[in-house]
Image (cartoon, rainbow, N blue to C red):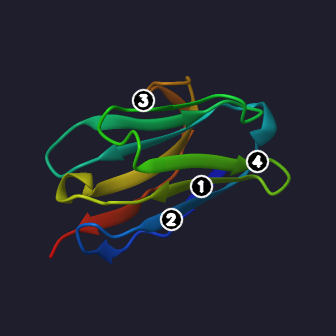
């Protein structure tokens, strides 16, 4: 199983980033997928989820209206479009296959660093 995130960067407040996750080694189109994050000195935080077929999505209150999760089951990829980024969004972002709406996962990637700072 591999989940490989990319797209993290240093960005100014108010800026945008698009994270991607390439999945392999498991039945991606049968898996609910999540984005979770971990800020420095804090625990793992659930950010967003998308159901296996993409019909349902969910967002934490802290990112609702700013982030959009999507997936392409033909390409085994998961994405997170992040707009209006804030310093509090600074964290390592992980894609994870697991429980919808939760930080509980079966598989998780190594993460990609997002830093929002002026």
* Left or right of 4 on screen, residue 52: right
Q: Taking 103 as reference, is 18 above or below it?
A: below
Where is residue 5 shown, x and y percent of the image?
53, 61
Q: Kindly report which numbered mark, 3 or 2, lies closer to the viewer in this rendering.
A: 2
Where is residue 25 shown, x and y percent of the image?
76, 47
Could you tell me which residue is drawn at 32 percent across and 36 percent down?
45
- Disc 3 residue crowd, few under 14, some 14–19, many 20+, Cα 10 Å: many
- Disc 4 residue crowd, few under 14, some 14–19, many 20+, Cα 10 Å: few
Could you tell me which residue is drawn at 78 percent across and 31 percent down?
30
Task: Count every numbered label the image shows and give the total.
Answer: 4
Disc 2, disc 1: CB below 8 Å?
Answer: yes
Q: Give the alpha-carbon distance from disc 3 to disc 2, as whole Å.
A: 21 Å
Which of the pair 47/68 is nearer the observer? 68
Q: Which residue is mark 4?
A: 25
Q: Which residue is mark 1?
A: 79
Q: Which one is earlier in the sequence, the residue at label 3 or at label 2? A: 2
Could you tell me which residue is drawn at 57 percent across and 38 percent down?
107
Q: Which residue is mark 2?
A: 18
Could you tell me which residue is drawn at 18 percent across and 41 percent down?
42
């Amino acid at each position: 199983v591999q989940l490989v995130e990319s797209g993290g960067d240093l960005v100014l407040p108010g800026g945008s980033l698009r994270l991607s996750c390439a999945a392999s080694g498991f039945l991606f189109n049968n898996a609910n997928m999540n984005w979770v994050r971990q800020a420095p000195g804090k625990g793992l935080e659930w950010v967003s989820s998308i159901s296996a077929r993409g019909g349902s999505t969910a967002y934490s209150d802290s990112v609702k209206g700013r982030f959009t999760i999507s997936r392409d089951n033909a390409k085994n990829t998961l994405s997170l479009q992040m707009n209006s980024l804030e310093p509090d969004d600074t964290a390592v972002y992980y894609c994870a296959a697991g429980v919808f709406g939760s930080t509980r996962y079966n598989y998780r990637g190594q993460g990609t660093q997002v830093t929002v700072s002026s």
